[in-house]
Amino acid sequence: MAIMVGLGAMIYLVARAAPRVNEEILVKESESKNSLFGYQKIEKIDVILSNSLEKVLRKFKLLLMKLDNFTNEYLDKVKGGKSGNGQKEEEKPTLFNGKEKE
């Protein structure tokens, strides 16, 4: 538990310190870079990667939802006692059916 709390605190501190990057340094670095590795191209690549990642994650979510529906239908079929052709099998006896025999 202490390790997880410590890890959370470290992530929180890093996230708070991240916006403190000095923009003047970034401007100087962008001027010194050639156009092949410019920040504008990196930003375009970042947008393309973000969009493609979003599409992949949405398709993965859809696949998981279909798998969940399939699993639920299968469990309902098994729980309901239906055979593969949709006909109900004979009812299984239960120990406590509500009627008390004396």
Image: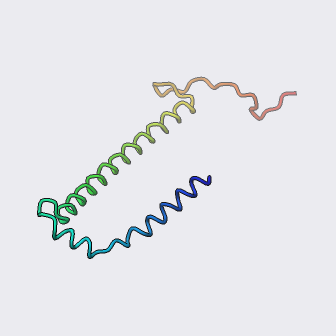
- Decide which of 20, 41 is in the foreground and name it: 20
The correct choice, above or below, for 91 with respect to 69 in the image is: above
Coloured how? Answer: rainbow
Quadrant of the image containing the C terminus: top right
Q: Give the image location of residue 76, x and y in percent.
A: 53, 36
The residue at the point 26 percent across, 72 percent down is 25
Give how far across and how far down residue 71 sits, in percent.
47, 37
Provide residue 66's location: percent of width, then percent of height.
40, 42
Above or below, comparing residue 40 to residue 79 in the picture:
below
Q: Given the current orientation, which residue lies at the most extreme left position? A: 35
Task: Please name the residue shown 51% across and 25% down the image.
Answer: 83
The image shows residue 16 at horizontal and vertical percentages of: 44, 69
- Position of 25 with respect to 70 (left or right) is left
Q: In this orientation, which residue lies closer to the viewer: 93 or 38?
A: 38
Between residue 11 and residue 67, name the one nearer to us.
11
Q: Is residue 84 left or right of residue 51?
A: right
Q: How many marks?
A: 0
Q: Residue at x 62, y 52 (%)?
A: 1
**In the drawing, does residue 9 fall left or right of residue 55?**
right
Residue at 32 percent of width and 74 percent of height: 22
Find the residue positioned furthest to the right.
102
Q: Toward the viewer: 25 or 16? A: 25
